[in-house]
Amino acid sequence: MDMHVSFGGLELDNPIMTASGTFGFGLEFAAYGDLTKLGGIVAKGLSLKPREGNPMPRIAETPCGMLNAIGIQNPGVENFLTQAMPALKRMGVTVVANLYACDAEEFGELASVLAEEEGVAALEVNVSCPNVKEGGIAFGQDPAQIGRVTEAVKKRAGNKHVMVKLSPNVTDITVCAKAAADGGADSLSLINTLSGMAVDIRKRKPRIANVIAGLSGPAIKPVALRCVHQVVRSVDIPVVGMGGIASAEDVLEFILVGAHAVQVGTANFLRPDFAFTLVDEVESLLEEIGAKSLEEFRGSLELPL
Amino acid sequence: MSLRNCRNVKVLDVSPVGQSKRPGEFFEITLEYPGWDGWQSGQFVMIRPASWELDLLWGRPFSLYSGDGETLTLFVQNVGRGTSRIVSMQPGDEVAIWGPLGNTFAVEPDTPTLLLAGGIGIAPFRGYVESHPKPENLHLFLAHRLPKECYPFELLSKTVSTGSMAEERPEDLQRIIDSLREQIADYAARDGLVLCCGPTPFMKTVQAFANELGARAQVSLENRMACGVGACLGCVTKDGEGHHVQVCTKGPVFWTDKVEL
C-alpha cells in the first residue's frame, strides 16, 4: 500500500508524525527505531532564546491521560540548529520545527532563522500552548492574533510549508482555523492540549506547580476527532490530526474524518518504539479493512443525511 | 543486541520481601533478561505491564537491582496506583521494558566508599556491591523506618561491612543526622567517596554535609518521569548553574555540588 502523503508542498513517506514536546528532537528515540521510518518528526517547541520552562512538578498522570506544564523548555533555535539538526539531516529525517514566541514580530524573526535551514521541511506555529504566561494560548483564543502571527511567519518563512497548530480551548475552533487559513497557512494541526487541573487532597495542593496544565492522551481523542471533523469542513487547507492517538485504529479514524496526516504525542510515552511500530500497523490495517489507498480512504466518512 | 532497547519480557516471579508493618509492601520482581550487553549500578529501567492498556499511560522507573544475564530482578515498594498493580502481576504476565537508562554511580575500586541508603534507597546498592571489584573497600549504612528485614540488608552484609539505624521515635532522627555527619566527615578526611540514595530529605542532609565538609559525594534522584529517555521534560531538576536538566538522561546520579535538591 502506498503510504506516501503530499500536501502543500510537504512530502511525507507516510502520514505518521510525532507531536512536538513528546519526542524531543528525535535523537532521544534513535536507539529504539529508525527515525526515517516515520513520516516526520515535529521537534520540541523552539524559541529565539533558550527557556528554562516552568517549575516542578510539571507532569501528572490522569485516567487515560496526563497533564503537563513544561512551559516550552528548550535550548533556543540556534542550539537546535547547531546541535540536533546536523545529525537529523545526516539521517535524512523529515523535520518540522515547532515555533513559540511572545508576539507576531518575534514569530516572524524565528521563522526567518529557520527559513534558510534546508533540513527543516516545515514550520509548525504554536499559537496554542496553554502553559506559558506570555503569548501561548492568548494567541490561540484570538482569531485576529492567529491571523497576524500566521502572516508574520508566512512572510518570513521563505518557501517553507507553514502549519498552524490550533487550541481546542475555544468556543468555535473553525473560526480560528479560518483565521489561520486567511493568514496564509499551508495546513493546520489540531488539537493542542485541553486546559486541565489536578489536586492532591492530602497535601491540599495542586499536582502541577503551574496549577493549570495541558491534558493529553487517549482521554482527549473524542474532542480531537470532533475538532478535526469540524475544521476539515470549514477550510480548504489540509489538516493534520492529533490528540490521544494510541493505535492504528485511532490513526485511521482521523484519516477517515479527513486528516491528511496525524501526529502521535503522549503515546510515545507508552513505550519509546511506539511510533515506529505504528507505521507498519497502519499499513496492515488499511489493507485489512479493504481500503484501496490512503487517499481513497481519506475523508470517506459517511454522515447521516 | 544493542545495549539499549525496548522489548516485551515475561514476569518470572513476584515474591514479597521482609516483614513490613504493612503486609504486601516490598517485592522482588524477576523478569526475563531483556537481552542487553550489560548494565551498571545507578542505571534504571522503565517497565509498563501490557495489562495496563490505556488506563495508566506511563511506565514506572526502577533502579537496576540484580541480574545475571538470564534474569533481571527489581526491588519494588508498593506505594501507589502503578506499583500496586505491578506487584500484583503473576508469572507469565508481559511487561514492556526499556533501558538500561541514565548514568551510573562512580566506581573507584581502591577508594574507601560509603554507601548511604535511606529505606528503599538501598535498591541500587545491591547491584553496586555485587559488581564492585573490591567490596572490602565498601561500607553500607542503612537508615530505615520499617523493619530491616524489609530490605536486602543481611544479604549485602555477607559481602560488605554494614551499619544501620532505625527511626522509630522522633528523637531517632537527630541520631541519624549526627551519624551521617560523622561518617561523611570521616570519608571526606580520607578522600573517600560517598554515594547516597533515598528520600529527598535524606539526600538533602547528605548533600549539605558533603558540601560543607568537602566530601566527594553523589546522590541518585527518583523524580517522577513519563518517558525515561529525555523527551518529556517532566523529571527535570536544577543543575549547579540553575538550569533545568533531565534526571532520566543527565542523571539519575549527580555530584552533590552539581545539583539542587
Image (cartoon, helix red, strand yellow):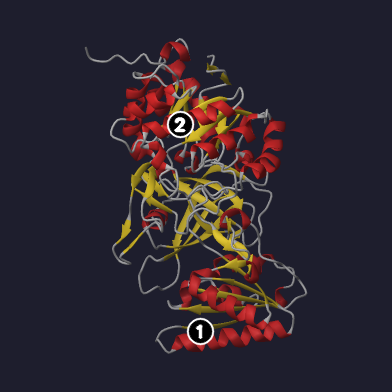
Q: B30 or A113, which lies in front?
A: A113
Alpha carbon of mark 2 to alpha carbon of mark 1: how far? 65 Å
Assign the C terminus of chain A to one quadrant of the image: top left
Crowding at label 1, few (<14), some or many (≥20) Cα neighbours within 10 Å?
A: some
Question: Hey, what amino acid is under mark 1?
Answer: Met
Q: B241 or B6, which lies in front?
A: B241
Q: A287 or A44, which lies in front?
A: A44
Asked if A276 appears above or below B10 in the picture, the reply is: above
- Residue B77 shows in the view: yes
Residue farthest right in this picture: B110
Q: Residue A59: give x, y in percent of width and height.
A: 43, 52
The disc placed on residue A88 is: none
Question: On what subunit does the disc labeled 2 rest?
Answer: A
Asked if A141 appears above or below B108 in the picture, the reply is: above
Residue farthest left in this picture: A305
Task: Give the residue number, with chain letter if any, for mark 1.
Answer: B165
Q: Could you tell me which residue is drawn at 40 percent across and 66 percent down? A: B25
Question: Hey, what amino acid is under mark 2?
Answer: Arg
Task: Give the residue number, with chain letter if any, for mark 2.
Answer: A148
Image-based side of A86 in relation to B35, left or right: right
Q: Residue A285: give x, y in percent of width and height.
A: 44, 21
Q: Could you tell me which residue is drawn at 68 percent across and 86 percent down? A: B186
Q: Residue A70: give x, y in percent of width and height.
A: 48, 50
Q: Could you tell me which residue is drawn at 45 percent across and 67 percent down? A: B17
Crowding at label 2, few (<14), some or many (≥20) Cα neighbours within 10 Å?
A: many
